[in-house]
Every structure is written in structure tokens, then in C-alpha cells.
Image (cartoon, rainbow, N blue to C red):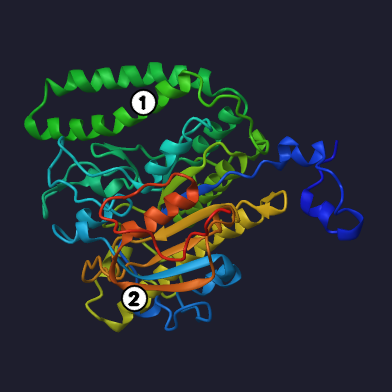
Amino acid sequence: MKHVSRRTLLRGMGATLGLPWLEVMAAPSMAAPPIRLAALYLPNGVNVDAWTPAEAGRNYTLTPTLEPLAPFKDQLNVFSNFWNANSKGGDGHYVKEAAILTCATIKKTPGADIANGISLDQQAALKVKMETPLPSLELGVTPVAIGVDAVVGYTRVYGSHIAWANATTPLAREINPRSVYERLFGAANGQQASAAKLDSLLLDRVLGDAKRLRGEVGAADKHRLDEYLSVMRSLEERVQRSSAGGAKAWKPRVPIDPKLAPTEHPKDHAEHVRLMLDMMAVAFQSDTTRVSTFMFGNAVSNVSFRFLEGVSAGHHDVSHHQKDADKLRQYQLISRWHVEQYAYLLRRLSEMKEAESTVLDNSMILFASALSDGNKHDPHKLPILVSGRAGGRLETGQHRVMSDDAPLANLYVSMLDAFGAPVERFADSTGPVTGLVKSIS
């Protein structure tokens, strides 16, 4: 029987107002679409002079860097004056960038005894982890960096992960778009458990080799292996969960066509980024997961942006602009390019229909950097955007100017509430963002 929404029946008013509640109104397709949460991480901060709108409220003008978001202005919240107090100390990058989603203070260490906190995405995933085949999806484009940054004395593992299951467990990222697609296809077609069993056998072998090797190397190499093992442990737990059967009674909301699998060898950085964002969109549309993160690059990323007209240097290099006019110009172009990729994801999600809404309508997509001005390594006035209405739970379309040094964790409290995973407190939060989340009647 074709599904008929109650809203459709009520449009006739006089002709339909007296109708009884019909079974067709309570059909399974009437179930509200799930809420999704994603976080996109930008390393190295932004050119702040071209970022922050001059006006507060709804009638604000998008700045040159934010102009690509014009089609989504009614779905967008621009936030000003958030900061991450627990990241104020330490080195220029790692302390701040590792904590962008945890709002914790990481432990200074060259290796094995890493410590951070649970991240926003994983706090949300705890609520829905049994409802989808994948509790969350961690994506990136750059391999994990290992070893120690000798300048500051921190393990580079901190700069390679924004998703943390707990204080000692950063989650492994996938950087191969084809592998992500095959993983999503396997989950959508009931192949997750069998594939996970094969993965488990391979993982056992790799972990066994690493543990044996640890007893045969020096102290420095032990640290590197411990870093590797700490990341692999999170992967091991996920493989074990998948082989145990995954989500119960789950079906994909849309089919995943194996013929549409992307290449595993993107031609350049720009294509690689777009393909990974495509994978996030497919994962959300199919409901293979409801939680995802994406890293445009590791901390201290110096990806070359020579492919942009007018840019001749790497990202980290121009972020240390020292107020040089030409470097600031290039810094702004790089910042804008990242916003364009964010807008690309929003457009993809807005084109995915769900009954009378879209996947974007039913999502919260965070865009954040752990630094404002990369030249000063400043964790004040962070560049923070959130798009999507979270199924109608979020008030959108504003430039929201917080009080000076408002805790970034306050935003995360509100996002978790809108996601349906409310917490009394997250990290150093002092309360939710006033007026952001609508009350449920």
C-alpha cells in the first residue's frame, strides 16, 4: 500500500479533518529518519580577517571565505568566540588539534602512554552503536604519522586522530575510498560478518608479529610499536564486534550499487577529498552509520595547494604568515577551498531525499579548526560552523556570537542533546548553547 502522510491528508482540511487515524499513517515508512552527526576537521587554522561575519543574528553577510555556503545559509550556524580552554598550554599544534573533539588536555608523551578523552562523535556513537552495522566511520586522506616530533616532545599519533573512543584509544582512520565503499557495500548486503572474520584472522597475525617484534628492538622502536598497537587495538575491537553479527534487524535505507565503487588511487589531493566526502554521504544515506569524522589533513599538515590559482606554497607554511600580505592572501584562498569542500558535502546531502526532508535536514555537520590564527597557534575565537537541522531539533540560519571565551564543549552538549544522546556535562562545559536546540513537544 502506498504510504500517505498525515500532513497530506490534513491539507484538505474540511474534507479530511474528520478522518480517523488510518493504518497507512502508521506504516513503517512513517518512522522519522535517523539523525546523523559528522565532524570535518581543518588543520592549521584560517585567515581570521576573512572569516568572521561583521553582523550577528540572521541578517549577516557571508565573508569571502564563507561565500561558498550561500546556498545553505538557512541551514547554517556560524559561531564566534568559542575556545578550548583545556588546550591552551603545551606546543603549537598537538595539544590543540588532538583535543578539537574531546576538549581535554592531552598527556605530553613520546609514545606508549598517550592520554586524551572521549570525543564528541564517540559520545554520540555510544547511543546508536547497536542500530547500524558501523558504530562510526573515521575518514581521512593522509596516513597516520608515527614517531616523535622532536621540537615539542609529543608523539605524532596525537596529530593523526580526532576520534577517540576513550582517553587511551584513538580510532583508526580509513584513507582508501574504494576500501570504504566496499566496506559499506558489504554491510548493506549482509557480508559484514564474514568479511570481518577474515579481517580478524589477518589482524591477529599482524598484532602477533608486532608483539613479537617488540621484544627484539630498542627503546625508541618500542615507543613506535606501542603507538602502532594502541591504534590497532581500536580496530581489533571493531572487527570483533562485526564478526559477532553487527546491528540487529538492520536494513539499508537505500541500496549501495557495487558498480559505483570509486577508484583506490585518486589522481590528486582535491579528488581524494571529494571521494572521501562522497563516502560519508553514502554511509549516511544508506544508514550504514550515523556518526562520522573526516580529517582534511594531520596536524601541521603542509599539503601543497599549488593546484589553486594564486597559491605557491604548502598549507602549514602559509599559516605562519607573520602578517605578510601575500601569505595572508594565499592562506585565505586555502581556507576558502576547504569551505568549498564542506559546501560540496552539504550539497550532496541536500540532494538525498528522505520522505519530505533530506539527509542534510536530518544531520548536524560540524566544520572546525583547533586554531583560529595559525600564525599565533591561538585556541581563542575558533572557526566553527554547524549545518543541518538535526531533524528539526536545531535553530539554524544565524551568526551566533558567544560571550568571550565560551567553552567549545557547550556546543557539544547541545549537539549531543539534538542527536538524542543528552549529557549533563561534556569536558569543561558550563551548559548548552542558549536557544540552539528546540524543545521536543
Point out residue 365 in the picture as x, y percentages from the top left corner: 49, 56
Q: Which residue is mark 2?
A: 48
Point out residue 236 in the picture as x, y percentages from the top left corner: 35, 25
Q: Is residue 244 left or right of residue 171?
A: right
Point out residue 204 in the picture as x, y percentages from the top left corner: 33, 17
Please, is residue 248 above or below residue 379 in the view? above
Secondary structure of the residue carrying numbered label 2: helix
Residue at x 20%, y 20% (from the top left corner): 211
Q: Residue furthest left?
A: 219
Residue at x 23%, y 68% (from the top left corner): 378
Task: Quote the CA–CA distance across marks 1 and 2.
Answer: 40 Å
Few, some or many residues within 10 Å of mark 2 (<14, 14–19, 20+): some
Q: Residue furthest right?
A: 15
**Label 1 with label 2: CB-CB less than 8 Å:** no
Please, is residue 162 above or below residue 68 in the view? above
Residue at x 60%, y 38% (from the top left corner): 261
Residue at x 25%, y 19% (from the top left corner): 209
Q: Which residue is mark 1?
A: 237
Q: Amino acid at mark 1?
A: Glu
Please, is residue 187 above or below residue 397 in the view? above
Secondary structure of the residue carrying numbered label 1: helix
Point out residue 338 in the picture as x, y percentages from the top left corner: 44, 63
Q: Is residue 42 at all visible to an observer of this figure?
A: no
